[in-house]
Amino acid sequence: MANLITALLVPFDKSGQLMEESLRKIVEYNISENNVDGLYVGGSTGENFMLDTATKKNIFRIVKEVAEDRVELIAQVGSLNIYEAKELAAYVVNELGYSKISSVTPFYYKFDFEEIKNYYFEIVKDVETELIVYSIPALTGVNFSEDQFGELFANPKITGVKYTAGDFYLMERLRSRFPNKLMYSGFDEMLLPAAAVGIDGAIGSTFNVNAKRARQILEAVEQNDFVTARKLQAETNDLIQKILDNGLYNTLKLMLTEKGVDMGYCHLPMKHYTDNQVKVAQKLVKDYM
Ligand code: NAY
């Protein structure tokens, strides 16, 4: 069955400093309460692109210290600074023993495909690891064609994609054409259709608070029980819609804080939460967790 992998939230205090003890707690909570199969560390959910190199390293180190080898750990090392990406890749693989790295497509500048391909090949060049391409066109503006994925996958160290998009035609084409590459879905609200196409895993922010239903969706699809899967996805999407309406990362953090894992604040320039957001999050915990 497909693996359930939490995109890890990271707690910060009001001044943007990492809350180390809380980070340890949310890692443990995901392993022993949510029973997930893995953690995706340093992704969008981890507010990673707003952090300095030392903080990123600290997060990777603490997560490994707590998780040890109990679940799979994937480190998102992608950065507009390719030298930082290489440094982080070497650190997590050689010093911490992460089993896979992942890298977002370089964003902001309009890099052409050759530049993007060079970026990926350069990141894996000096490190013995597998890399999962993190494709999220809605945030980066970078779209790959089927053939361009093929050019990336031609590098044996590039072993899969975290596909955070709603184009299920392309997802199916990739699944059929590259059956030996790993396909991870990235939109939790589309877990059912992704699982129907056939995925190796799902990586999601909402698994921090909704892992049980997500697991049940994967199980129902595995058993070809689409009536149950649809019901669970509808419940899940009622929850996700309310989370998105109330502010994604703030609400996830507030829900976990309500459950006893103090997740602090989001990193500026993301907003700090309001009293009303707290109230909504508390009700979501009561209704859905
Ligand atoms: C990441 O890097 O943390 C992810 O992309 C995980 C996937 C999430 N994407 C983002 C941009 O947060 O879980 C999804 C997403 O939050 C969820 O589906 C709600 O839209």
Image (tube, rainbow, N blue to C red):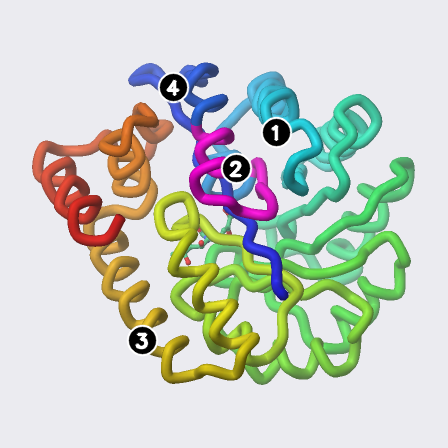
Say the numbered circle drawn on residue 67: 1
- Type of residue at label 4? Gly
Mark 1 or mark 2, which has the lower sequence index?
Answer: 2
What is the distance, in whole Å, between disc 3 and disc 1 at their CAs? Answer: 33 Å
Eye-nearest disc, 4 or 2: 2
The crowding category of the residue bearing disc 2, from other C-alpha atoms within 10 Å (few below 14, some 14 to 19, many at least 20), is some
Q: Is residue 269 visible?
A: yes
Residue 70 x, y percent position in the rendering: 65, 35
Q: Secondary structure at mark 4?
A: loop
Residue 81, placed above or below residue 109 = above
The crowding category of the residue bearing disc 3, from other C-alpha atoms within 10 Å (few below 14, some 14 to 19, many at least 20), is few
The answer to if 288 sits in the magenta stretch is no
The answer to whether mark 1 and mark 4 are in CB contact below 8 A is: no
Identify the residue at image location x=25%, y=46%.
247
Q: Secondary structure at mark 1?
A: helix
Residue 205 x, y percent position in the rendering: 43, 48
Q: Secondary structure at mark 3?
A: helix
Mark 4 or mark 3, which has the lower sequence index?
Answer: 4
Identify the residue at image location x=74%, y=60%.
160
What is the distance, in whole Å, between disc 1 and disc 4 at their CAs? Answer: 24 Å
